[in-house]
Amino acid sequence: MIPLFRAIAIAEGISFLLLMGFSMPLKYWAGIPEPNLYIGYAHGVLFIAYALLAIWVCYELQWGFKRFLVLFVASLLPFGTFYIEQKYFKKEGALVKG
């Protein structure tokens, strides 16, 4: 399940950056709302999947609420999920202690 969580974390981070850096400017500066709709839906699904998997990972690894809070807050910040993926998970889904 760790490789799935890593993949969702990266996809969620990319969708967040696309939403804020690409589709929102198109919607509000160029008057083109369609990309925002589709990227927004994709980001919403990925965000929910990330949050649910974060709960599952914290439960399975017996991480406390504090670690879950860090994982959740990272999903609200640009580049946050990339940071989490690098800080807590190594290549090939291995867990980083600490």
Image (tube, rainbow, N blue to C red):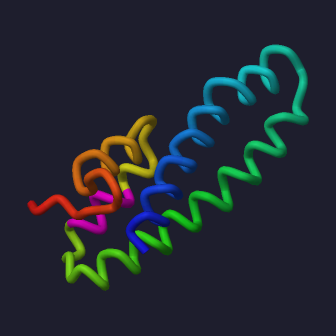
State the quadrant of the N terminus. bottom left
User: Which residue lies at the image location 73% right of the left edge and 46% below the top edge?
Assistant: 40
| Residue lying at the far front of the rendered structure | 92
In magenta stretch: residue 69: yes
User: Which residue lies at the image location 41% right of the left edge and 36% below the top edge?
Assistant: 79
Q: Position of residue 89 (x, y in %)?
A: 27, 56
Q: Position of residue 25 (x, y in %)?
A: 72, 21
**Of residues 10 and 94, the one drawn nearer to the viewer in this rendering:** 94
| Residue lying at the far left of the rendered structure | 98
Q: Position of residue 92 (x, y in %)?
A: 34, 57
Q: Position of residue 10 (x, y in %)?
A: 49, 47
User: Which residue lies at the image location 83% right of the left edge and 44% below the top edge?
Assistant: 37
61 sits to left or right of 77: left
Residue range of the region highlighted in magenta in the rendering: 67-72
User: Which residue lies at the image location 27% right of the left edge and 58% below the top edge?
Assistant: 70
State whether residue 74 is above or below residue 8: above
State the quadrant of the C terminus. bottom left
State whether residue 32 is above or below residue 98: above
Q: Quadrant of residue 38?
A: top right
**Of residues 61 and 38, the one drawn nearer to the viewer in this rendering:** 61
**Of residues 90 and 19, the one drawn nearer to the viewer in this rendering:** 90
